[in-house]
Amino acid sequence: MRIIIADDEPLMLKDLERVVRSVRPNDEIHTFSDGMELLQFAMENPCEVAFLDIRMGDIDGVTLAKELKDITPRINIIFVTAYDDHFRDAMEMHASAYILKPAKKEAVERELQDLRYEVDNKKDVSLYVTCFGGFDVKAKDGTLVKFERSKSKEAFAYLIHNHGTTVTTRDLAAALFEDEEFDDKKQVYIQKIISAMMKTLRKVGAEDVVNKGFNSMSVNVNKVDCDYYRFLDLNKDREELYANDYMIQYPWAEY
């Protein structure tokens, strides 16, 4: 489970992190003193639980919770505050819980065991893909996937870009080599690129990410955790959280 914690008071933030880690030592926990940094992280890394201070300097916790729910509607919001006069606001946000500071281990443990939205700890994702700020791929264990050929990485990027739509070998050649003629030699070369791409994916146990047909293929979007796909799923314009260029390495992605 991925947990995020926000508080603009360093001591409070550190103390809450300590308590949460004592309750969930094996979970992925990230702390933030800046609300916008937290939102940027949440856009690129789906989170199941957010511990939020209601009164923060750059953005209040209730507004932050609304922004997080736009990104991940079923995120569990747990408000942690020194004040008890925001309970109504918290409940209107369909928060999972409301804890008074200083957060006690017993309270944190209780609320994490009784979350509003069930957490799926067995997500069937084979790869983590980043498209904004440059294209990169990570395996399940978080290690960077290293493609043997730069063109095989670009081929996989093009499949990701097409978001599950079938791509022919001719389509792929047109993207990777622009106006070059698609002759027999080019077709053989494309097949070598595809073979190298699949070899790399097999090495990290992610061969199931690509659906292959006769001279065509597509990406299985259900096997990929991708920032671009989350961006496409947003129900309103959130471009300010994607300040970096999209797949900046590849000319075909410029538009």
Image (cartoon, rainbow, N blue to C red):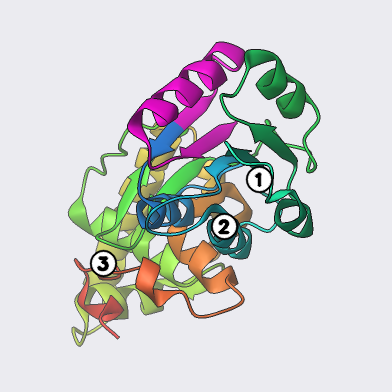
Q: Name which quarter of the figure residue 253 lies in.
A: bottom left
Residue found 49% across the figure and 80% down from its top: 237
Distance (Cα) linking label 3 and label 1: 28 Å
Circle 2 packing at 10 Å, graded few (<14), some (14-19), many (20+), is many
Residue 67 forms part of the magenta stretch: no
Q: Is residue 46 visible?
A: yes
Q: Disc 3 or 2, which lies upstream in sequence?
A: 2
Q: Disc 1 or 2, which lies upstream in sequence?
A: 2
Q: Name which quarter of the figure residue 118 lies in.
A: top right
Which secondary structure lies at badge 3? loop
Compared with 157, 26 (above or below) is above
Q: Which residues fall within the magenta stretch?
A: 1-29
User: Which residue bears the numbered disc 2?
Assistant: 68
Q: In front of the other: label 3 or label 2?
A: 2
The answer to whether the residue labelled 1 contacts the one labelled 2, judged by CB atoms less than 8 Å apart, is yes
User: Which residue bears the numbered disc 1?
Assistant: 77
Compared with 99, 215 (above or below) is below
Image coordinates of residue 98 in percent, x first then y, are 71, 39
Distance (Cα) linking label 3 and label 2: 20 Å
Image coordinates of residue 172 in percent, x first then y, are 36, 73
Q: Quadrant of the N terminus?
A: top right
Residue found 32% across the figure and 63% down from its top: 132
Q: Disc 3 or 1, which lies upstream in sequence?
A: 1
Identify residue type, mark 2: Leu
Identify residue type, mark 1: Ile
Identify residue type, mark 3: Asn
Q: Image check: 134 left or right of 218?
A: left
Which residue occupies the foreground of this view, 240 or 187?
240
Circle 1 packing at 10 Å, graded few (<14), some (14-19), many (20+), is many
Residue found 47% across the figure and 17% down from its top: 18
Q: Image check: 99 left or right of 39?
A: right
